[in-house]
Amino acid sequence: MKYFLILLDKKKTEFFLLTLSQCILFGIEGIAHPLLLKYIFDEGIIKNDFNTFIILIGSYFILGVGLNLFFYRFSLWSKTFENRSEQDMIIAMLNAYFKKKYNYILEKKEGFFINRVYNDVTEGFIPLTVLIRSLAAQVTRVIMLISVLIYLSWKAALLLVILIPIVSISAKRIGQKIKTITQSERDAQGNFLEILSSALSSFRLVRIFGLFHSVGNLCNEKINKYLSHSYSNHRYIKQYETMNSLVMNVSDSLTIFVGTLMVLKKQISFGSYIAFVNTFWRAVTGVMNVIKPFAELKRLLTVNERLFAFLNEEEDKRVENSRSTGNMVILNDVSFSYGCKRVLKDFNLIIEKGKRVLIKGPNGSGKTTLANIISGLLNPDKGNVILPQRISGITLPIMFPPIKVSELLKDQDIINELGIQYLKTRDLRSLSMGEKQKVLVGFTCSQKADLYIFDEPVSNVEQESVLKILDFIWAKTQGKSVVVIMHKEEVYYEKFDQIISLTCKNELCQMTEGFCESD
């Protein structure tokens, strides 16, 4: 529960006011309804007092209408609160996502985080705000109903004392099982969504080469694992609900039997009997409504623990300590792997301040991985890294956010120099690959930095624009360190001070001056 209260943050006061209001409404309804019912029969019908009957039935009607109107207004307030809470929490989760280590993002993939950022909020945090308020209101109503029962007949009210422990013990046992399963269920759902997201994005490849069978089998495997956990959760919850239904059935029979017996023995009036049966049934229902969501409460609390952990995960201090700040780029005995695949091993590199460096090599040789480490985006598995304080640049593949070009690139002079004025109002995602590269080059150069990184800046660009873009980069980054990844355009290699050639065996060849022939 403490994690939930922390997650509420500045909304605690409003949440407590909502809860208090709901409790007051349920409390009034719980105590007024049965007492009015008793007096309608005893004072109005049994005594044949028409005036009293009209007053009481009118009060009953006004109470019902008034409570319904209040509940309507309350529901609107509640929904507004839930919408704002959902919006703020999703943005907070999104902000936390963008602060995660890139190593972690690569490991889990984007689809996994859709489940964490969105589903855990909409299926965990928001339902918990509703459930806690509902439970508090139900407890208030039960207290009021039990008070009425004691007023009507304290002996008959003892039946509730027998029923409550039976359900409570069962709820606690099943709740522990559900808490354990929920964590696995949410992770399995996230893994499935990641696979599904990748499958949907590969439509052309799957359609053209007939890969549906392979892709379908993988999706089937992941969804089967998720649904297996979901089924286990469902089974435990339904076991608990079935037991509650049986208890309700027993309580209904006992209510009628005990109430009738007390009327026959003239221990209570007929009005008290009607009120007692109604109140006892509603009290038992209320108790069930308090205890019944216990299993769901455990599940939602587990999801909220995940939310809190995601928002407050501590960075890996060991990895963070491997990086420091300096004027040069220095990699000392750096190693990096993607899972079991080793990409760099005991890698050493020095890039002096103000140097223009080219990284070249075949696909799979580690060019982009090396650039990501130099940019500070990836942390090495081992080794030490020294990087400049300010770095600007991004590596391929590029997935642009859903914004316009003008929202990313705001420097009008750069837009004019690159000749991309016509792109300003376009959605970044709608651009061609060449247009995206021009925008990215412009944005990278628009940032004040000590080190600039460009990944294939002239790929997919018309040939007549290649030299123009390279000259633009040199002009905008004059006196700064520059790292460029290119695997073609050999004619322009002489523009670089240093050339790093990577082979598939990750051997390093450094040339500090002139032109470096390909291996």
Image (cartoon, rainbow, N blue to C red):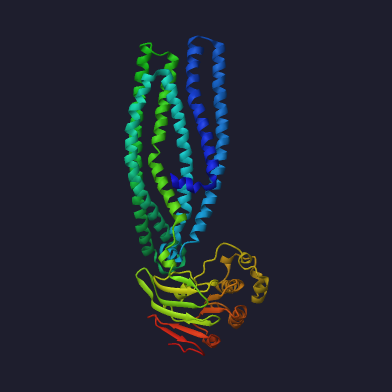
- Measuring 50% from the left and 23% from the top, which residue is drawn there? 32
- Measuring 39% from the left and 35% from the top, which residue is drawn there? 291
Looking at the image, is 302 positioned above or below residue 438? above
- Measuring 58% from the left and 74% from the top, which residue is drawn there? 441
Quadrant of the rendering where the N terminus is positioned: top left
Residue 106 x, y percent position in the rendering:
43, 65
Q: Residue 61's quadrant in the figure?
A: top right
Q: Residue 309's quadrant in the figure?
A: bottom left
Quadrant of the rendering where the C terminus is positioned: bottom left
Residue 284 x, y percent position in the rendering:
39, 28
Residue 47 x, y percent position in the rendering:
49, 9
- Measuring 37% from the left and 18% from the top, which residue is drawn there? 259
Name the residue nearer the viewer: 348 or 131: 348
Left or right: residue 149 versus residue 72 is left
Q: Residue 319's quadrant in the figure?
A: bottom left
Looking at the image, is 497 positioned above or below residue 20? below
Residue 3 x, y percent position in the rendering:
45, 47
Q: How many marks?
A: 0
